[in-house]
Image (cartoon, rainbow, N blue to C red):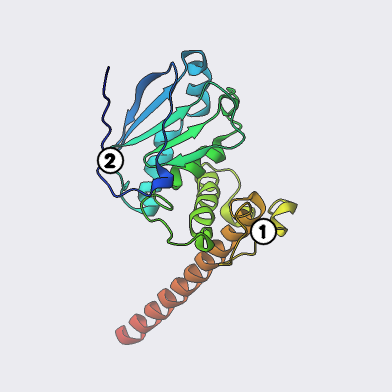
């Protein structure tokens, strides 16, 4: 006999709406400019603190790189009471399975990936599925940027030495994927290479322009 009402302030694509029902507890993790909440079974709380403990640092980095967090209601991470094959992003929410919460921090790249989707995929959503690489390519590249930020493998190292499977599947740019194929890991890795190539080209061009500017300034001074 109870009616629950949930309101989403921002425009939302229907595929980004999710309903999770379970015996969960909700806690606020941090308020480092953006409120971050956790919703999960109590039995997983200890592991969660280890696996998801660096999310506030991720949020801070991505805000610096991608711009302000785009959703007014903050960010919520849900860990279900059962296992999931892959995590999933929703509007302002990411959903992980209990298997992603093992206390070993084995899923941290996925945590970064799903958080990045709040900018790439949720704030801006493609009109046609053939452009899905703009969601997944950016989210995969965000994994590499987080790795670089943590002093682990740099984005360039990820790009130069991707897993062998990255050579398979969808190519490194826009194409028309089959329905069951558009989010496969091999294609996502290859799509991230497109962004790294673009970033490298922009960095090279910026450096060249900077050198030209310094030379022109020196000539004028003389």
Which residue appears farthest toward the top when viewing the image? 43
In the foreground, 164 or 202: 164
Measuring from the top left, give residue 148's x and y in whole percent: 54, 48
- Residue at the image position 33 percent from the left and 53 percent from the top: 67
Mark carried by residue 160: 1
Q: For this view, does 211 lie left or right of residue 147? A: left
**Residue tagged 2:** 8
With respect to residue 213, does 48 lie above or below? Answer: above
Depth check: 45 or 122 in front? Answer: 122
Of labels 1 and 2, earlier in sequence is 2
Q: Which mark is residue 181?
A: none
The residue sitting at 54% across, 56% down in the picture is 137
Question: What is the x, y in percent for residue 25?
Answer: 39, 17
Label 2 secondary element = loop
**Spatial separation of the CA atoms under disc 1 and disc 2:** 41 Å
In the visual, does 62 lie left or right of 111? left
Instruction: Tell me if residue 198 comes above or below residue 8 in the rendering.
Output: below
């Amino acid at each position: 006999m109870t009616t629950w009402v949930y309101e989403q302030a921002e425009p939302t694509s229907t595929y980004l709406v999710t309903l999770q029902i379970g015996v969960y507890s909700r806690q606020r993790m941090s308020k480092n400019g953006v409120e971050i909440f956790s919703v999960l079974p109590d039995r997983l709380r200890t592991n969660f603190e280890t696996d998801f403990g660096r999310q506030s640092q991720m949020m801070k980095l991505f805000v610096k790189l991608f711009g302000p967090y785009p959703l007014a209601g903050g960010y919520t991470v849900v860990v279900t009471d059962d296992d999931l094959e892959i995590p999933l992003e929703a509007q302002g929410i990411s959903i992980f399975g209990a298997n992603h919460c093992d206390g070993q921090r084995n899923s941290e790249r996925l945590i970064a990936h799903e958080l990045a989707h709040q900018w790439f995929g949720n704030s801006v959503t493609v009109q046609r599925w053939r452009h899905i690489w703009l969601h997944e390519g950016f989210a995969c590249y965000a994994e590499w940027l987080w790795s670089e930020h943590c002093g682990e493998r740099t984005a360039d190292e990820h790009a130069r030495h991707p897993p062998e499977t990255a050579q398979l599947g969808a190519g490194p740019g826009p194409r028309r994927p089959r329905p069951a194929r558009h989010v496969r890991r091999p294609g996502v890795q290859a799509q991230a290479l497109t962004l790294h190539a673009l970033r490298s080209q922009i960095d090279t061009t910026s450096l060249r322009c900077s050198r030209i500017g310094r030379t022109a300034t020196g000539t004028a001074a003389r």
